[in-house]
Amino acid sequence: MNPPTRDIRTTCPRDCYDACGAVVRVAADGQVIHVRGDPDHPVSRGKLCRKCTLAYNGVFLDRDERLTEPLVRIGPKGAGQFRGASWEEALSLVAARLGALLADDPARIVYSHYTGSFALLSYFFPMRLMRRLGATEVAPDTICNDAGHTALSYVYGTSLDGFDPRTAADAHCILVWGANPSASAPHQHEHWLHEAPGAVIVVDPVRTATAAQADLHLQPFPGSDAALAFGLLHVLARDGLTDERFMREHAIGGGELLELAAPCDPAWTHDHTGVPAQAVERAAHLYGAGPSLLWIGQGLQRQPTGGNVVRSVAALPAVTGNLGRPGSGFLYLNGFGNRGIDEDYLSGADSFPDVPAPISHMALASHLADAARSRAFVCWNVNPMGSCPDQRRLRRALEREDLFTVVADLFATDTVDLADVVLPAASWLEFDDLVVPYFHRALSAQVKAAEPLGEALPNSEIFRRLARALGFDDTPLLEPDEAIIARTLAGTGAGLEFSELAARGTVWMPGEAPALQFADGRYPTPSGRVELACEAAAADGHGRLPRPIADARPQRGRLRLLSPASPWSLNTSFGNDERVAARDGELTLSLTAADAGALELSDGQLARVTSPAGSLVVPVQITDALPAGVGLIPKGGWPKLRADGANVNVLTSAQASDMGASTAIHGLEVVVTPVDSRAP
């Protein structure tokens, strides 16, 4: 007779568009047997993505890979040499060091966090203590998407109230610009796009699996997206596909914008982007016929003029009237607000509003290198040594003996190796939380399936205990998870207790019928209209209107380097799972055959890739998926697991985009030279 088991429905909290439903099978002794997809989940339909399937049934369940007790450093910084400690000892040490800075200058306590887990309590709760301390936050989205947030806020007043994906059933066309669902939203690639009745257009310099399956793929040279957007605007105006009434009643600056687009005919567009003139016209006609959806990818704006690019692309819905009706709208992200989530309450901003100005991830290495500005560094849900630019400089900063570093994590990452105190965090399988997907308008339960391994604790409990060790008794710092979840659920209007949500897994918000974006014709801009011409942008130095520009092409002997996600990576998450790493394969530089030939390189040959920040030796992989003049090295992976101790971020600089002090990683230019040997 088989021993009894139980199945627990829960939700994956990774930084991913899909927010997949999962079913965890648990043995009678409380051990997790396996993690599978939830067959009743409306998005993932019984399947987790490949990387999560392997990792959740691999390193996440492996006691030898997990951090299971607090650790205190005993060796040189970066050596990863620690001794075990009790929670009382570890937190007392942290409290003493941070407490000493309170009387001096608490702004020199710097903290970094991001979406290693994007469940609400795991993400937000530790911020309450950091805000109470008066610490300096590293603005999370500057490593990812802040240029787009800033640009869309100028145009529409929000970047966080996107179309409801269920309205795709009414769309004549879906335009996916700068997103790669095949790697970063696999269930949208497999189901949502595949089942949508309208034509699918993909704009991407890489012929991804999603681009290859599209009805039309436009492949601009990186950095020319704004020029392409203006080319589409030109054709829309020339061929009578603009919505003059909508622009007159709901927008500011439509006429001025189209005057700028007048010279941007298809021939001009081809010269500036490399996209054939006929393809420009076909895309404009498909999108302009409407109703149409525009998915603005986050990768699109990771370039030096990423804000201008997004302002240009974001003009398309307003110019064509593709807003406020079924099958129309744009999506960058669907934020917490349109599910009634109170971020200020969760993060403590309402209780502790007086905090220092945040810094950008682009300034992190220089900030941490300066003892006058930083004396302590605290991080959770993030691995900056793997994910941040200017990798070598950041490592030197974190090696400072006088920089007290505290890391909460599940695994011994590169950042953990540089810590003074390590606090073992529970995994998503080991505590209750709420998940708010940022693609679909839904609300989901993350349900505890097992006890934390060893002495690991959820982030919220770690920071509650640290608050007590510091002598704080403020109610927000000690509020139990159950109370936070209950108050948050009440604010959503879903009318559900957590147990009810847990039983259902995921519910649509606000209901079963798709929501219409901007259905009331009101926009949260200063004018209440779509601001295609924006005075706020002008006041901030960006001009009233976006500009029809393209970046200069690399000079002879240089390549533009892209570093998107691979289908097997999720930033540096899962980088220590052997099965994931085996399927991801070795790090490679992808080049066209023409570029490889010009550089006297052949498939499999080792090449040295050099930027002003550093160099990396990788084998060449010949591909026909890129434009000439472009190289590609995927992001992700743990530097310390490579022989040279680096990933692609050893090449990336701290250059910021034009808006939001955000990453411009896809604007990097490199020199590639042969190495006199072949990869094994």
Image (cartoon, grey):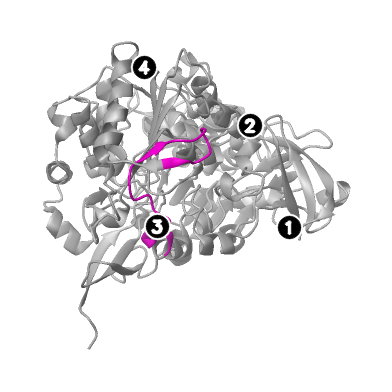
Q: What is the three-letter code of the residue carrying label 1?
A: Thr
Badge 1, how many Cα within 10 Å: few under 14, some, many 20+? Answer: some
Asked if the magenta segment contains residue 63, the reply would be yes
Q: Quick one: 63 or 670, which is closer to the camera?
A: 63
How many neighbours does mark 4 have within 10 angstroms: few (below 14), some (14-19), or many (20 or more)?
many
Sequence-first tag of 3 and 2 = 3
Residue that mark 2 sits on: 262
Pointer 4 residue: 107
**With 532 as the anchor, is 558 left or right in this view?**
right
Residue 519, can we see it? Answer: no
Answer with mark 3 or mark 1, whichever residue precedes in sequence.
3
The residue segment tinted magenta is: 58-82
Q: Earlier in the sequence, mark 4 or mark 1?
A: 4
Give the label, 3 or 2, closer to the camera. Answer: 3
Measured Cα–Cα span from mark 3 to mark 2 = 31 Å
Reading the chain from its start, which is encountered first: label 1 or label 2? 2
Residue for badge 1? 623
Q: Give the overall secondary structure of the magenta segment.
A: loop
Q: Residues within 10 Å of mark 2 (few under 14, many from 20)?
A: some
Q: Which x, y percent locates residue 504?
A: 19, 63
